[in-house]
Image (cartoon, rainbow, N blue to C red):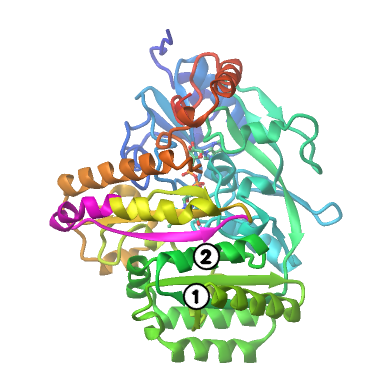
Amino acid sequence: MNTVAADPLAALREIAPAAIDDGAGALQLYSHDVYATGPAPRAVFRPATVEELAQGVAAATAAGLAVIPRGGGMSYTGGYLSPTPDFILVDTAGLDRIVAIDEADMTVTVECGVTWDALRRALQPRGLRVKAWGTLSGVNATVGGGMSQNGVFWGAADGSVVDSALSFDVVLADGTTVSTGSGFFRPYGPDLTGLFAADCGALGIKARATLRLVREGQGLAYGSFAFDDAAAFFAGLSAVAREGLAAESFGFDPFLQAQRMKRDSLAADAKSLVGMMKAQGSLLKGVKEGARVALAGRSFLDGVPFSLHCIAERRRQSEADADMAEIARLVTQAGGRAVENTIPKILRANPFPPVNSMVGPAGERWVPVHGFLPHSRLVEGWDAIQALFAAHRAEMEGLGVQAGAMLAAVSPQACLIEPVFYWPDALNPLHRHAVEAGHLAKLKGFPANPDSAALVDRLRKGVIEVFATLGAIHLQIARTYPLKASHDPAAWALLETVKRQLDPRGLMNPGSLAL
Ligand SMILES: Cc1cc2nc3c(=O)[nH]c(=O)nc-3n(C[C@H](O)[C@H](O)[C@H](O)COP(=O)(O)OP(=O)(O)OC[C@H]3O[C@@H](n4cnc5c(N)ncnc54)[C@H](O)[C@@H]3O)c2cc1C
């Protein structure tokens, strides 16, 4: 039985007084993730150094408090929402140093609170990037958050973000720091880096990470394609994924596509394109591309049921163009047709945009749910999810709940299906904190709407059940996806033994991964 000391923050205050924030505003903000709400922490602990992190964690757990790590806070699966009020929330924002960029050995070592955006800004001028180089939320989302719940988007052809990791320094529940593996090769023996990768902070707090660098391709080619139905879309997506021709390939169903087009600002798109081309040393090309995007306007996807967007990244432009020609051939064979390639161009020009898309175009609430399936089961998965929505159509319409989907290739073996819900409901303090003030001011907003929220909760669970019947796997497992049920019992027992060994009192992010 864990006992909490009478003044559990006393030792922590002594060690790092400046790192403790127990103001009402902070406690409120840090009790929400993008989707749900948990108890407020006793305090937010924002260490300035790795040593302070280790000492603070030791002091908090010695006083009987649980410790819950949080990076950018951009998740929606309860990963940092505590099951107990007796906890401190460890905010890694102060651990944001880029410790060493080693161009000889092609590695970068960072403190785990650094954002993907900051890391990219440091690497890009040197013509380098991390292998899989972050999530679309990377203006706020951190390397530590990505390594802990895994992620896919930029550089998806090179794997998910944990594939970029070589080694970690991890602070355990008692304040001990463990260094995993080797800083230039993985795995070195049994994969201890892999043990902590995608653990959703259940095993420890990642303080530093050494990541693999690759040279960024200077040749970029873009393609967008329209499909009349889901079966043709998935045939095209899988064909591109199997060949590994695109660095990124992703698509939208008709609903999500319409949402995107409502939101994006054309002028801003054209400007960011010009900026990118200028940065690459080609002002003339930038102005031409900007003008082309503006000219293409918003209407090129009107009436397009499904759209697929691909980016080929290679060392030379001629190679990227050749890959895109092959992508176009495969996609056409699958029943797709080329449309204006504005969407991948503007996304690549500004890969970590403001996170305004965490709310709907009129200020609706937003939450995704996802599963990865092998290519052979994508259409079946898609149809099963559509059947679930069809069975609830009247209820959804009555309560203003809408659903779309993002779809993406993640490897030659698998693709992502990510249904996304929108519903009229009040925003929480995290939305108001993370969405740009100017954007927030333009939103209509909605009053609290527990009935719509309850339906979304049921549908989201329903989608997770559908995925479970198909043997899907997930990122961001945290407190939302059923890891235990899909594990071999002997493998699960092994994981429980590891958890007990590293965290015998169950104070490191208790309940994350259901451990
Ligand atoms: C607008 C938007 C776009 C998004 N786009 C993508 C996308 O393209 N691809 C994608 O995969 N996801 C995406 N996401 C989901 C989410 O942002 C990512 O999963 C991201 O990796 C979360 O990182 P974070 O730093 O915000 O982590 P947090 O939300 O702070 O934490 C996530 C989990 O990791 C743990 N954790 C955080 N830091 C550490 C640490 N240092 N050590 C141990 N555990 C830690 C937390 O306890 C929690 O369990 C998006 C979200 C939003 C809101």
User: Relative to the observer, which residue lies in front, 290 or 231?
Assistant: 231
Real-space Cα separation, disc 2 to disc 1, in angstroms: 8 Å
Q: Position of residue 327 (x, y in %)?
A: 62, 74
Could you say whether the residue bearing mark 1 is in a helix, strand or loop? Answer: loop
| Residue ID at (86%, 55%) | 104
Question: Mark 2: few, some, or many residues within 10 Å (few <14, many ≥20)?
Answer: many
Question: Can you identify the residue that label 2 sits on?
Answer: 235
| Residue type highlighted by circle 2 | Ala
Give the quarter of the figure containing the N terminus. Answer: top left
Question: Can you identify the residue that label 1 sits on?
Answer: 335
Residue 167: tell me if it is visible.
Answer: yes
| Residue type highlighted by circle 1 | Gly
Residue 345: tell me if it is visible.
Answer: no
Q: Position of residue 432 (x, y in %)?
A: 32, 54
Q: In this view, which residue lies farthest toward the top? A: 1
Q: Is residue 139 above or below residue 344?
A: above
Badge 2 or badge 1: first in the primary sequence: 2
User: Relative to the observer, which residue lies in front, 238 or 365?
Assistant: 238
Within 8 Å: ligand 1 and the Cβ of disc 2?
Answer: no
Is 375 part of what is drawn in magenta?
A: no
Question: Mark 1: few, some, or many residues within 10 Å (few <14, many ≥20)?
Answer: some
| Residue ID at (16%, 49%) | 449
| Residue ID at (41%, 13%) | 4
User: Relative to the observer, which residue lies in front, 14 or 163?
Assistant: 163
Mark 2 and mark 1 in contact? Answer it, CB < 8 Å.
yes
What residue span does the magenta drawing correspond to? Answer: 388-411
Q: Is residue 108 above or below residue 264?
A: above
**Any mark on residue 143, and which?**
none
Q: Position of residue 307 (x, y in %)?
A: 45, 72
Is 389 part of what is drawn in magenta?
A: yes
Residue 302 found in image quarter: bottom left
Q: Is residue 318 left or right of residue 20?
A: right
